[in-house]
Each structure stands twice: as structure tokens, then as C-alpha cells.
Image (spheres, rainbow, N blue to C red):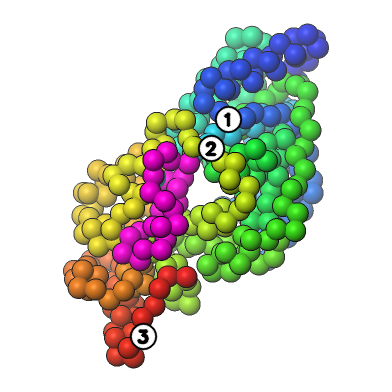
Amino acid sequence: MIEMRKSDVDTLRALLIAEAAALGFASVGITGIDLTEDERHLDRWLAAGRHGEMDYMARHGTRRTRPAELLPGTLRVISARMDYWPPGSADAQQVLDDPSLGYISRYALGRDYHKLMRKALAKLAARLEEEAGPFGHRVFVDSAPVLEKALARNAGLGWIGKHTNLIARNAGSWFFLGEIYTTLELPVDTPATAHCGSCSACIPACPTGAITAPYQLDARRCISYLTIELHGPIPEDLRAALGNRIYGCDDCQLVCPWNKFAREASHPDFRARHALDAPRLAELFAWSAADFEARMRGSAIYRIGYERWLRNIAVALGNAPATAEVAAALASRANDASTLVREHVAWALARHLTRTTTGTTTRPP
């Protein structure tokens, strides 16, 4: 533990706020490490199996809810947020409404945020060390078991909404979170209070019904889980509900009234790359493995790999209108080398055949 005089603490706090802003963070706060009630909530969620195949969440044990188990001596957590809404990108709802296009969660349109934010947080910690002297610290951006939303709430950055995302009163929810665990005994901020009120727009907006009740999310039904975390086949009973969402889902955030206060990203790396803000599904499905490698390296999308990328697009093509372009795209991979891809292509082709023989048409939910 590193104790400091009040004058030193005030100086360091002012420096923290100024340096965080200079590094591109929209807000920064400080909290202690008591997450007792959040640990109980997490334990209940895991016991119900709502984490699906994310077994690592259970394997991490209490390290997620007890920061000192990740960095011995941790007394405070500095939580920071960085806006990511890509400026100049295609209108999200218009893309969702066009089944010939693929929808990618807006956070993944630019370069991978992990390295960018880790680098910025490391610079922030180094600047604090210049002022305070050496101290124990560790930087995290989705890189270890960290209960980031609860810590950000406790640090005053926002409240956890009914969709389980963090919402800032003056900035909505389109932002990333990162943390610095530290042994510095800094003064803590006041936790944020909730302001969802009677609004529950996010709950019926979820295409797959993953928000089972206010503040309750079943990841096994969440489109972000299905298109990113799930390694095997997407459950057949959920495929139609995916519509044209091929990487993640933003529906619960798109309807949130607090996002009228959201701000565009200031960092140029968060601008959409390779026209991924409104890509044609058939064109994406024609990418070779080399195309995926060249265009997705440096993107958050890269981590799902080429096979799951094609799996997701096959489902979206199965939900698209039966045009010649869609039929040709699916036929081109009917004998794909991947069993996973072939199975989803076969489902998509069968879906189109059923709709053709019955004379029905479908639109994404």
C-alpha cells in the first residue's frame, strides 16, 4: 500500500483526469475493490448455466470479483471509458432493414480496440508514476477476469442498464471500458445511480429474447454470444432470429433513449474499415481465407476466424430474400471444406427451398 498526503492526492487526481482526456478517454473514475454483491450475482448466473460455453468464466473463480487476487496489494481501480461510435458510418437501422447487407456490431467496424486502449492506459499509468513514484499496477482491457461494468459503475462512470450494458447519463452506452488496478490509496468516486426508470425498451428489442427480465441476460440466446463466442453450430431454432447480424448485435442499444447523448469516437482507428458498415452478404461470402486474413487482421472480428465468419454469413444468407445473387453465393459453398460451413449452407438452402415451395417470404426480425 502506498499512502499519500492529501495535497499529493489532489495533485495526482487532477493529473489523472487531464492525462486521461489527453489520451482520448471520455471519462475516468476511481473505486475501491469490494464487489461482494456482484460476486453473488455472478455466482447465481454461472450456476444457472447462462454463460453457455464460456467455461473460462467459471474457471476464473473469484479472481473476477476480487481484484487483489489478480494484483496482490490492489486497493483501487481506475476505470476509464472511450467512445467508439464510428463517425461517418452507414445508418445502423437502415443496414438492419436491408437483408442483402450484413450487420456488424458498431464497435467492431474499425481497428481492434484492445491494443489501442491498453497502450493508452499504460501511458496513463506511467504518467502517474512520474508524479507519484513507482507503485504496483496492472492494466486490463478485456485481457483478464475483470468485472469491468460493476467497477465502472462503482467508479461513477455509469449504471448497469436493464440490458446489462453500462449507460452513462451524458454519453449513452457506445463506449469501451478499461482498468488500471493500483496499490495507490486514492480517494474513490461516488458510485453512479440507475436511471432506466420505467423504460424497458431494450427487453422486447432483443431478437432472440436473451434479456429474460430486467438486468438478466441469458448469454446462450444472445446474438453476440452466438456469432462470436460459440464455436460450434448455431442452434437451429435461433438462426432465423439472427436476421442479417453476422458479428455481434446492437439492437438493445439502438433503442435505448440514453443513446441520444452518445458521442462519436474521436480516435481515427475506430472509423469503419473495408466498407464493413454496410457490406453486401454475397460479396463477404466470396472472400477467400487470404482475403479474410488480409482484411480482418487488426480487427476484433479476426479472433472468430474464417470458418465462423462464413458460418455466420451463411445464416444471414439463409434469412435473405431468395435472389439469384443469394442462391449463387450459397451454391458456391455447398461443398465447402468445413463441415461447420457446409451444415449452415445446407440449412440456408433448405430454408430458401421451403419458402419457394410454400410461396412464403420472410424478413429479418
> Which numbered circle lies on residue 26?
1
Percent x, y of residue 353: 29, 84
Foreground residue among 329 and 341: 329
Which corner quadrant of the image does residue 20 belong to?
top right
Q: Amino acid at mark 1?
A: Ala
Which corner quadrant of the image does residue 184 belong to?
top right
Residue 335 in view: no
The local crowd at label 3, few if under 14, some if 14 to 19, many if 20 or more residues have their Cα within 10 Å, is few
Q: Is residue 84 above or below residue 301?
A: above
Residue at 78% in and 8% down:
7
> Which numbered circle lies on residue 263?
2
Give whichever of discs 3 and 1 has the lower sequence position: 1
Give whichever of discs 2 and 1 has the lower sequence position: 1
Q: Is residue 363 above or below residue 157?
A: below
Percent x, y of residue 159: 70, 44
Q: Amino acid at mark 3?
A: Thr
The residue range painted magenta reads 85-108
